[in-house]
Image: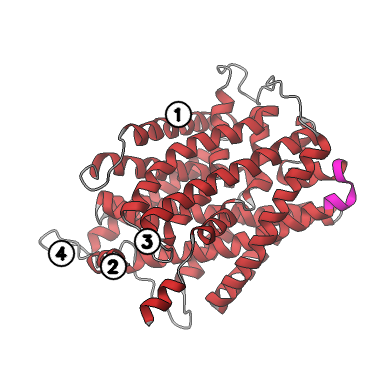
Amino acid sequence: MKDTTDKNNKLSLIGSISLGTGVMIGAGIFVLMGQIAELVGDLFPIAFIAGAVVVGFSSYSYVKFSNAFPSSGGVVKFFNKSYGPGTTTGVYSLLMYVSMVVAQSLVAGTFGAYTLRLFPESYAGYASILGILLLVTAYIINILGNKVIGATATFTAIIKVGGIALLAIAGLVASGFADITGDYIPQNTETLPQGFGFVAALALSILAYKGFTTITNQGGDIKNPHKNLGRSIVISILICTLIYVALALAVAGGLSIPEIIKAKDYALAAAAEPVFGEWGLWFTIAIAIVATFSGVIASVFSASRLLGMLSNMKQVPSLKRIGNFKNPALIFTVSLAILLTALFDLTRIASIGAIFYLIMDIAIHWGLFRYLKNEVKFKPIIPLIAIVMDTVVLAAFLYIKYLNDPMVLIVAAIGIILILIAERFFMISHTDDDGNMPMGMENTNNKNNKS
């Protein structure tokens, strides 16, 4: 009877796609569009198409991993399978974790930027404070338990995805197709080859799709995971691409590029007002608030679960109950997101997140190509193409940031160095005299294989 009940509670393919698109079509799109336009001008709708192509090649490795090793461990399980327990798996897993926390900070800052559209310009400096308040609220909701989180996520996902899709279609119908000339030159890139800024901007458009990686965590909860996980990833990316491109074309038809760049932290709201009037502005802000609210709650939940999993696998120090605090992983996750929200603006937060994500993504493809040829059936050329694409985009983005905002590179480098040093010292601290690291991962693997 129990097995039957468990099977009945499994996610269907449609349910998995709904959850996947709910995470992917999130708050990031509300702020990333303006940042991408700042790099490529009126080519930003095409940047979302090109980003989808890169993500399409990238998703191949995740599909193959998910089909071969479906589990609730998701990306962490993939690293463990590729590199084994130890420093390498820990570092790349923590990069994934930090990129998720950075995403929380980005979403929280976006919440502040759009909410302040309801107030006079004199309140413009309070976006970070509103973002921090949202993160505190997300912590409280996560403490209340899974039922509250699940009900909140389901309700807001329907409003969010439906509202953004409606906004994209209505905006496209009202404004028509914009003229795309491609003659915009980003700041400080006049001497660079033509198209360099476009390649760099793909790092941000890829960031808008990165939510598909959370689908890999559904391995223990979906029907027929060896087939449906891969299908869910592919279909979710296709749906998001259609909505993103329609939304970008609608914005391009409603505002000039200087106007989009000026309002880059709230570009969708700025584009809605001249096309739909005051009601359109209010509708866009309402959808943005719902999207950011639900996005932070879901991201805090996922990131804290990931950190807790790494603790259980002994890849990071133990995060069991400390004093009166029941969930140290949740506290640490929210605290780090609050720190980022307070210290950095939305452009820098997005840039740091893109850098960490692309490095982690390259490691996924290399792990599949180099170490799992005998365990997973795949075409080697595809992960190699994904590695080349990621590397070219990352290199271009790093160089653009070196020219325009080197502080981003400094912060990202410090973050990576700290993660590497901390992980290495932790590994050494629980290595026995024979050089073995009792990671406690064998039991985790066995459980995952049974699921």
Dot in front, 4 or 3: 3
Q: Which residue is mark 1?
A: 392
Closer to viewer: mark 2 or mark 4: 2
SS for tag 3?
loop
Residue shown at 10%/61% (left/top)? Answer: 434
The residue that mark 2 highlights is: 450
Which residue bears the numbered disc 4? 432
Q: Earlier in the sequence, mark 3 or mark 1?
A: 3
Query: In front: mark 3 or mark 2?
Result: 2
> For the residues carrying marks 3 and 1, which lies nearer the camera in this image?
3
Describe the element under mark 1 as helix, strand or loop: helix
- Can residue 340 be seen in this snapshot? no
Q: Are marks 2 and 4 in contact (CB under 8 Å)?
A: no
The span shown in magenta is 275-281
Residue 321 picture location, percent across and down: 41, 79
Q: Amino acid at mark 4?
A: Asp
Question: Residue 73, labelled with which disc?
Answer: 3
